[in-house]
Amino acid sequence: MRTKTTKAQNDRGEALGTRERVVRAASRLMQRQGYDGTGIKQIAQEADATLGSVYHFFPGGKQELAVAAVRHGDEEFAGILREVLHAEPDPARALVACCRLLAEGLRTSDWADGCPVTATALGTAGRAPDIQRAAAEAFARWRSLVAEALRAAGIAETDAAELAHTVISTLEGAELAAQVSRSEEPLRIAGQHLARLADSYRPR
């Protein structure tokens, strides 16, 4: 779930607008430092933007910007899920591939880039309902993508929905455990067991 783009360019090498640079910088910094550890001035510097431009796009300040950062992280991981699930129609194999991809991203970032949605939302629990709502919407979207793939593989509607909850919760927990332990093992094991679980629900 790590941010893969630079401050000034997107994946296609195109220049990013100021608002997009600010959102991506906020997402990247909150991903690594949490909400409370990230300041507006630092975000502006990281985005090569002025403080005035940050407040122009986000008059609600840091909380409004954090909501946009969470939505950016939501879209980023949703894109990864869609890509993996589309490339591998067998959900068991797709889940293994997803865990492998998350592990590679963590290792490449020297274990610094965990889930930007979780990192931001946890730091604001109970005091920023807009951020919490955006995070809840992110988790719901990810579950929906997984459930859709499970249904396409022949798993019953209710089972697919419940299993999608387990998949997303397991991915989040395994990614955090991998980050803390600086090891791919939690994600590797999670992928193996999620694959077995998904297979157990497949019609015989």
Image (cartoon, grey):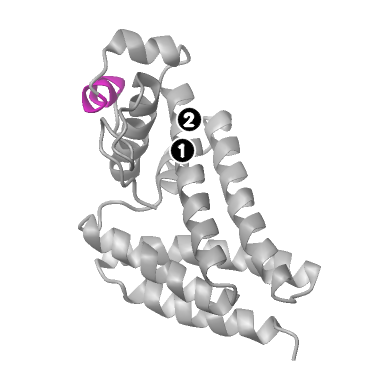
Q: Residue 156 in magenta?
A: no
Residue bearing mark 2: 68
Residue type at the position of mark 2: Ala
Q: Which residues are magenta?
A: 40-47
Viewer-proximal residue among 196 and 34 = 196
Q: Quadrant of the C terminus?
A: bottom right
Residue found 51% across the figure and 44% down from its top: 74
Q: Is residue 153 above or below residue 173?
A: below
Q: Which residue is mark 1?
A: 72
Name the foreground residue: 135 vs 90.
Answer: 90
Specify whether 181 is left or right of 190. left
Residue 121 appears left or right of 187: right
Residue 155 quadrant: bottom right
Give the number of marks. 2
Q: Position of residue 43 (x, y in %)?
A: 28, 26
For disc 2, the neighbor class at 10 Å (few under 14, some 14 to 19, many from 20) is many
Query: What residue appears at the point 58 percent right and 31 percent down from the top-left corner?
Result: 129
Q: Is residue 182 left or right of residue 126?
A: left
Q: Which mark is residue 182?
A: none
